[in-house]
Image (cartoon, rainbow, N blue to C red):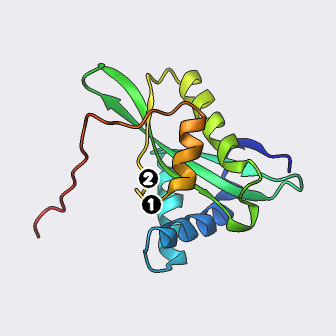
Amino acid sequence: MSISTRLASHHDLPRIAQLFDLYRQFYEQAPDAELARRFIGERFHKGESKLLAALDEAGEIVGFCQLYPSFCSVEAAPIYVLYDLFVDPAARKGGAGRALLLAAEALARQDGKARMDLTTARTNHAAQALYASLGWVRDEVFLAYSRRPAS
């Protein structure tokens, strides 16, 4: 399968929102097409993220990647947080994930980012193998924590 990638446009948002809903379900969230549409649309229209689309030979969007601009205080440099990457299950093993990661790296280089960071589920071994094959290095030094603010 021949995969191409490009920055997403406004016209791509409905399909990317569908994939985003599936992505959230992969991470054990309830299906919510309206939430997915709203969230993706807000990030796009406010310029809060960069969306990359992976297209198959027919020009259909089969995957997406969402990057959030951030900073590394230690390096005193801008970075991207690659927070979302998802390929339609029917299109997996066709190179879309790899193509999106390479496009994200090219975009980070173009935008002057010092690096990209990502996290994935400990059980997502397929994604971990892909990241390693492309030279991503697993952090063995720092632990990640999160906390919801008290209401």
Dot 2 alpha-carbon crowd within 10 angstroms: few under 14, some 14 to 19, many 20 or more: few
Residue 140 shows which numbered tag? none
- Horizontal side of residue 89 vs 120, given as left or right: right
Looking at the image, residue 98 sits to the left or right of residue 66; the answer is: right
Q: Which residue is mark 1?
A: 123
Location of residue 92 by image quarter = bottom right
Q: Which residue is mark 2?
A: 120
Number of numbered discs overlaid on the protein picture? 2
Q: Nearer the viewer, mark 1 or mark 2?
A: 1
Q: Is residue 71 left or right of residue 148?
A: right
Give whichever of 61, 43 is nearer the camera. 61
* 89 over 31 or under it: above or below: above
Label 2 sits on a secondary structure element that is loop
The residue at the point 47 percent across, 24 percent down is: 113
User: Vertically, is 57 above or below 115?
Assistant: below
In percent of the image, x 77 and y 53: which residue is there?
A: 94
- Residue 138: x and y in percent read 41, 37
- Image coords of residue 90 (percent x, y): 74, 67
Q: Position of residue 77 (x, y in %)?
A: 35, 21
| Residue visible at 57% across and 54% down in the picture | 126
Relative to 71, is 66 on the left or the right? right
Quarter holding the C terminus is bottom left
Query: What's the amino acid at mark 2?
Result: Thr
